[in-house]
Amino acid sequence: MLGRFRTFLLFLVFLVLMSAVGWFSASFWGTNPLVSLLIFGTLAGALNFVFYFYSDKIVLKSYGARLVTPQEAPRLHRIIDKVVLQSDVPKPRVAIIASPSPNAFATGRSPKHAVVAATEGIMQLLDDEELEGVLAHEISHVKNRDTLVMTIAATMAAVISFAARMMIFGRDRDVNPLVAIAVLITAPIAAILVQLAISRSREFHADHTGAKLVGKPWALASALEKLEHGARVRPMGRGSPATSSLFIVNPFRAGAMAGMFSTHPPTHERVRRLRQMRF
């Protein structure tokens, strides 16, 4: 129920934000505010529908992920089977991303429609116990219905940012530069902060739940240390930073500003909490 409520709340926030952008954009485009609000509100509703039913396909395609059978990826399926037996969720579909960057994520609108994806790099970098810890973390996201919430939050950040730019640069007449700067900065940051707040808390919770599920917090701690270094050395070569919150560690090389709005809590803090866990 909590997962469903968070999803509904996020849909509502997205609708309000998009409607607000539509209302304020009317003065820039010279249109009727009610017409602009209706257009943006309808667009938000349509996007909510699309991302609810097709978020997994969109994300998987953006990273070139390929669904694999147990015959094609026996090690990955074997470890996921082991984790699923200890959880209360159906087995998710399994996908592999052809990338040397070590990482993994889960997506899908519900446990019955979930997909867990792992890169070729993570399977080469981690041993079985470390990989088990990572996959338990991702299956915890599935169990807690985090995958849909995090996908919608990422989408919100991207769409609000795009809408703000369209509002400023999509017209011919001059714009007050102070207004332009305010819109260009505050709208994307507001969306990113929503994404940040959701994903950071969810990562800590999935770390704890996943480690407790397999009884090996030290294995996940070791995996996170390796993944942090590996993703820094070999960042993801495709995909959008707007979806970085889906991964277990940030897959992109972050600059100074990106670090300020990181969707992941500090790895050293996650490792510290895991090493302090007692059963």
Image (cartoon, helix red, strand yellow):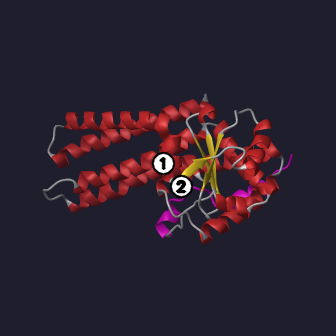
Task: Give the residue pinned by disc 1.
Answer: 154
Residue at point 25% right, 40% down? 23
Q: Is residue 165 magenta?
A: no
Quarter of the image for residue 144 reads top right
What is the distance, in whole Å, between disc 2 and disc 1 at their CAs?
8 Å
Element at label 1: helix
Q: Amino acid at mark 1?
A: Ala
Q: Residue furthest front?
A: 71
Residue at 80 percent of width and 52 percent of height: 217
Across and down, in percent, residue 62 comes to: 48, 52
Cβ atoms at labels 2 and 1 below 8 Å apart: yes
Which numbered tag is attached to residue 23?
none
Residue occupied by mark 2 = 244
Q: Is residue 27 left or right of residue 131?
A: left
Left/right placement of residue 164 relative to residue 192 reads left
Q: Nearer the viewer, residue 213 or 124?
A: 124
Vertically, is 230 above or below 103? Answer: below
Q: Is residue 160 left or right of residue 119?
A: left
> Is any atom of residue 11 visible in this view?
yes
Check the image and name the residue furthest to the right.
279
| Range of magenta residues | 256-279
Residue visible at 64% across and 61% down in the picture: 266
Specify whether residue 187 is in view: no
Residue 95: x and y in percent read: 62, 47
The C terminus sits in image quarter: top right
Residue lying at 65% horizontally and 67% vertically, measured from the top left: 230
In which quadrant of the rendered view does residue 252 lie? bottom right
User: Which quadrant does the N terminus fall into?
Assistant: top right
